Each structure stands twice: as C-alpha cells, then as structure tokens.
Image (cartoon, helix red, strand yellow):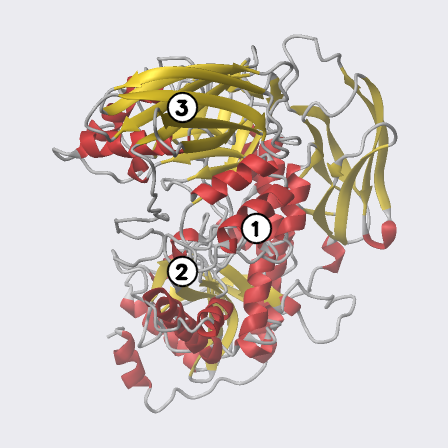
Amino acid sequence: PFRPGALYNDGGIVDSVELIVSPAVRVADLYVRPDPNTGTIHIQANVQNALPKNANGHFEFTVAPAASGETLNAAALNYDLPPGDTLIESKLQINNPRLWNLNEPYLYRVTARVWTEGSNSFDEHSTRCGFRDFRFENGCFQLNGRRIFLKSSHTATHYPIGLHWPHDADLARRELLDMKVMGFNSIRFFCSVPARYQLELCDEIGFMIYEESFAGWFLQDSPKMGERFDREIREMIKRDRNHPCVVMWGLLNENPDGPVFRHAAGMLPLVRSLDDTRVVMLNSGRFDGVADIGSLSNPGSTVWEDVISDQHPYKRVPHTAAIIRELRTASGGENPVFISEYGIGSSLDLSKMTRQYEQLGAEKLEDAQWYRERLDRFMVDWKRWNLADTFASPEDYFTRCLARMGQQRLLGLNAIRSNPNVVAYSMTGTTDCGDAGEGVITLFRDLKPGTVDCVFDGWYPLRWCLFVEPVNVYRKTPVRLEAVLANEDMLLPGEYPVRLQVVGPNTVRAFEKTITITIPPPDNMPQPSFAIPVFSEDVVIDGPAGRYRFLAAFEKGGAAAGGDVEFYVADPAEMPVVETEVVLWGEDSELAKWLADHGIHVRAFSPDRSSSREVILTSSSPAAPGGAEAFKNLACRIAQGSTVIFLSPMVFANGEQPAAWVPLANKGTLENLPSWLYHKDEWAKKHPIFDGFDTPSATQPKGLPAGGLMDYTFYREIIPDVAWTGQDSPTEVVAGAINTSIDYSAGLFVSVNTLGAGRFILNTLHIRENLSRNPVADRLLLNMLQYAGRDANKPLADLPLDFDAQIKAMGYQ
C-alpha cells in the first residue's frame, strides 16, 4: 500500500529488456576478473550451442583501452562445443596496467568473439572492466593499497511517475553526478539494484557502489524464502560483477536475528562461487545482535570477519550538546566504526512537488494526489494560524525549510569526522525516496538550497571540525573550545602553524592563539587516525552580547575547509525587568528562587479570591489537590482578568489523559511530532513573548530571534518534541511546528487563549528545565511574565454570564 516512509510493494520487470537475434552458437555471458597485482585478466565465457549437435567453435579474446580501442593483447583457441552451455576460460596479460581510481577511473574493454566452421556469421560480446583492489585492512577501507575514508550515501530506485523507473532517464544519472560533485566517493544502492546505465556512468566517473538486492529488507520467512533470496543475490552478482565501480555486495539491511538473517549469514559460499573479488557486507546496522558473526567478508575470504562495527546511530533533532558528544565518541569497542546510516533530513516541498506533477500532466497519479492532499492540509493550518504574517508565501516557507537542512548536514558531518573511531560514513540519504524527506536532493532530483555547499564543505579531505559548548552562555562564563583536524592524508610530514580566534559583535576579538600541529611521516605505524585532536581549552568570554564565531586557519602549508562555528553570548544586565508581582501556583522551590534571584516579587497561590488581577505562573503540579476544583478556581481567576502562564503541559494530566484539565471545551491533545531523521520545522512569530516590548531600551532590550524558522543553534535546548494539536484556533498564535518530512502533522508550542476578561498561555517549550542554565530559557520566561503583566493594574471584571456553561463544557463540575 502507498504510505510515507516505504517503497512500493510491487514486482515484475524493472529494467529494460532486449530481444537479440544471434547465431546458434553465441556468448551468453562474459565474466572478467582483472588482477591488479599481476596485470592478468581472467576470462570466463559461457557459450551456448543451440544446435542439436556438437559444433567446432573458434574463439578470439581481445583487450583494449575502453576509450580508444586499440588492441593491447589477444588470445585465440578452438573448442568442441556440445549442445547446451559450455564454460570457456582464458586469460589476457596487460603489462603495467593502469588502475581504476576515484580520480582516474581507467577502463579496459574485453571482447569475446565466437564462430563455427562453415558459418558465415559470428557472435560478439564485450564488457568494460578495471584493475582495482578494494578491501578492509589495517582498520580502514583501502582502494588499491591506499586507505580512504568511505564517503557514501544510500539511495533507492524510487522516482516520481515511473516508481522504479524514471520518466526521464537523466534523473537517474543526475543524482550520481550531483553526489560526486558534493564530495561523496560512494553510493549504497539500498535494497534495490541500480539501472545498468547508472553503473556504466559510475565506472566512467570514478564512483564506488555498495549494491544490495530487493531481498535485502523485510523479506519474510516462507518455504520459498531461501530460493528467492538466492535467486536475487545470484542474478544481481551475475549481472553487475564486471563493473569496477561495484566494490561491495550487501546482503541485508536492519534485519533481526531469525531465519532470513541465518540464511544470509550462510550465503558466503554462493557469493564466492559467483565473485571472490569484492567485500561482502552482511547486515547493515547489525540489528540482529549476533556477536559471534562478523560484519564483512574481504575479497577471497570465505568467513565473516569481526573487523568493523556497523552502526545506524540516528539521533533526535535538533542535536543538543549531549547528542553531538555521542556522535563524536561513538565506538565499536576494539573495532573501528562504519556509520552505514545516519542523517538529518528536511521537509518535502509540497507546493513545488504538486506543481511539478501538474507540469508533467501527471496530477491524477496516486503519488501526485498524495502530495496534493498533504498540501491541502498544510494550507488549512497556514490560514488558521495566519502564517502569512511570518512567511511571504507557502513557497517561501518551504524554501526556508529545505534551506536549513544544509547546516544540519554539516553539523552531523562535523561531529562524525571529528570521531577518531569512525572510518566510513554513509549518509541518509541521497534522494527523498519513500515519499519522505531524507535526501540531500529531492525526489525530482532537484538540489535543495544550500546543501551542495554545506556537504562539499563537510566532506572536504582536509577540514577543521570545531566545537563550542555551551552554545548559549552569559557574559564572563567559560566555554569549551575544541578543534579537531579531519585529515585524509592530505598534509606532508612536518609542522604547521594554526591560528585560533573567537570573534564577536563588531569584530571584537575575545580570544586569539597560535598553535603548532605536527604531521608524522606516513610510514609511521600505526597510522594516525583520520581525526586529529589539536586543541581543547576552557575560555571565558567577556564581551558584548550577540553572536560569536570560533575560527581556525592554517597560517602556512594547509588549505582546509571548515574552520567556523558560531555560539551566542548574553549579558545579564540586558535581561528584561519584571515589575509585576508573580503568584506561583504549585510547589516548585527552585522556580520560586529563580524568580527571587531576578528581583521578582513572588507569593504562593491562595484559593481565596483575589481582589486584583494577578500574573499566575504554574510549574508542573497543581497548587492544591482536587483536580477539577483546583482548575475551576483557576479558571475563575482567568475569567475575572488574571493571566496564567502554564509553563509545562504536564500540569493538565489526569491519569492517561494528558489534556484533561486544559481550560478549554475542545481540549485537543499533546502529540509527539517527528523529531529525528524525519523532523518537523519549528517557527516563532514576532510576538512579545519572543520580541520583548516594541521599543528597545536599557530595561526592554531587543528581543529573541523570531519571525521565521527557529534557529537550531540558538534554540536547540528549548525546542520540544511535543505540541498541542486538535484545539480550536487560539486568540494569538506564537510558536509551533509543521511536519511535512514524513506524512503530515502540525501543532503549537506557544499560544495565548482568552477566557472572559483574562488570558492563559499554553507552552511546551523546554523553559522550566533550562532556567539558570540557558539564557534563552531565562529570557523567554521573563518575556512571558512581562507580557502577562500588561493588564495587572486593571480592576477585576465580573464573571461572564455564561461562565457556568463554560465551566461545564470544560469538565470542571
């Protein structure tokens, strides 16, 4: 069934088919194995004799450069061919063969010709090949004896309109060229074999392929499972084994232990009978948990070798300091790590995709209608939340959502490439396959704004990986500055001077230091890691509030990318001043202390009716037991003109009902929006809760960044996973999130609702848990209190005439 996050459950023919007219004796299959150590090309030709009798076959094998065609060597032999299939073996020698490399993918063409006595026709079959050796050795992948950091991404044969086959063949080529330009050196064809012309292109441009069959994921056990699995693997290998770009066969993806996994683990004899020249990967991510079976088999090996830790460390988005630290320190125990899946995706541009289907006259197709229906749902939220006051148009909104992805990809690359344990990384993913926003390019193979630049930067072979923690601090507070050099053997041995700086607003230099790093000779063993820590120090930042940058640069001898990461400094003296008394509803001594420390007069909530309007602040527990009675009392205060800030949604829970005590008739619910690879996009309006008051001054300074998407560096600890959904439109929409990355969902983080003469603020932002630790949390609460205190001096109002009916509708009887 068609659903987001999945490919199509279909079968049949998914590549082109040719009808070939040939002589009765023909070359049905040609398999060549170039040996880079000897220059020998081993040849196996399967010859079919369709005659009812033996035939005297004459064979000629030639080899030539694929680009020019002059014959370099030839071999001839005669063979008596019985009816049916005969395997003919031969070999050709190349003196000083040129290797197939990423930067110079040299190709040869081997041609086999057969004819029979008395026939006036012949049959000819040719294939391209290359001399190369790819294996895992000495703790890393090696191509032709040189270690490389594997820079991969996974893709699937999923296209708009044509499903498994592109309506425009250029789509399948374009994605590979784009990935090569971005700095990738490999593509993992994820549980779907590529088209043959894609492999031909990769042969030509020097792009490595990790190939899996359609049986690699979600194959279920059945009486025919083994037969089906073996057939898929056999036909994949036989079709593609001459391509030098194919360096790894993959058998499974994320399979648990069970009959399918055990069958795959026992398939090495079959694989090696078909091809003994490639790495074989067992089960990407190793969800099977079987510790006594290794993850890969090297060329020529008939056993699973326990030499690498194959991991899928997907993380919550936005990445906090703890998550970045996890990626930087991910370990495989005694083995190096291959992160074969991980990434941070983007939304789907529902508006553009809908128009692209229409432009191609394909708007009635099932997938086109699916995108159209989600765009319609988005437009309902766009209008009811009046997002036109924050974004110029729906198209502008989606462009901004896609554009933010590049920096998130760079964040992940920065963390992974600084990890000395990681020797290979396959990014999720190449395209938005499965109708979900996991790709660095879209389903229509369009480039997502800014992504090429960011990924090119992240994959650069010599790169600074810089870190500052925390990313939001008060002035005169220490931050930890760290610099790691990701070096793919780009620097000559020697010493290199490096300049480190912290630069703030108006180019204020808060820190500057020159250090020297030393690169040892390449023959030193063991070889250094691809990630070299060069600096780590706590530095006190004493400068004006604003955005700061930690910079690194070689002063001589090295041309590195990266070298720039930002963080923010706040000045306590510039925090808003709250002059209104705050009434604290619920037991929270830490919150009471925080209020007092900020010069705010605070008192505990009293069930007795107040004689004036109040600013009431709730934490996570009610002020008194009794549930309905306590909230009924609070609702009366609101209706008479008080303002209540519900700092945490947990206060509304009653057993398994998370929204039981919300003072609304239509209470809605709390929904976890996607917050990992597929994630929501968070936005905040220019509202007093974010912007402070209209005119900045000494006591009312300029507000927090708002009026668009919430910046993941600035707000990363504050952004929640949970949002209010299903409620009627509030009086004021302040902040929320929309998920178009996988299916569609949306909700609000902060909203203002009216009840009688008063108001209440619903909030799910992580403010309470970050008070005193994060200036953004402090500022948000101070802004809320300022905003809530605007009407504090007004007299109490009478309860609305229909208040009893409202209370009844809220369930507070």
Is residue 162 depicted above or below 33 in this figure? below
Badge 2 is on which residue? Answer: 649
Q: What's the mark number on residue 448?
A: none
- Residue 188 position, x and y percent, is 46, 37
Is residue 59 depicted above or below 461 in this figure? above
Disc nearer the start of the sequence (2/3): 3
For marks 2 and 1, give the CA distance: 19 Å
Q: Nearer the viewer, residue 613 or 536?
A: 536
Q: Residue at x 38, y 40 (%)?
A: 193
Front label number (1 vs 3) = 3
Disc nearer the start of the sequence (2/1): 2
Badge 1 is on which residue? Answer: 716
Q: Can the viewer see residue 610 in this picture?
A: no
Q: Nearer the viewer, residue 24 or 609?
A: 24
The extreme front residue here reads: 118
What amino acid is found at the position of numbered circle 1 in the picture? Arg
For marks 1 and 3, give the CA distance: 39 Å
What amino acid is found at the position of numbered circle 2 in the picture? Pro
* Element type where label 2 sits in the image: helix
What amino acid is found at the position of numbered circle 3 in the picture? Val
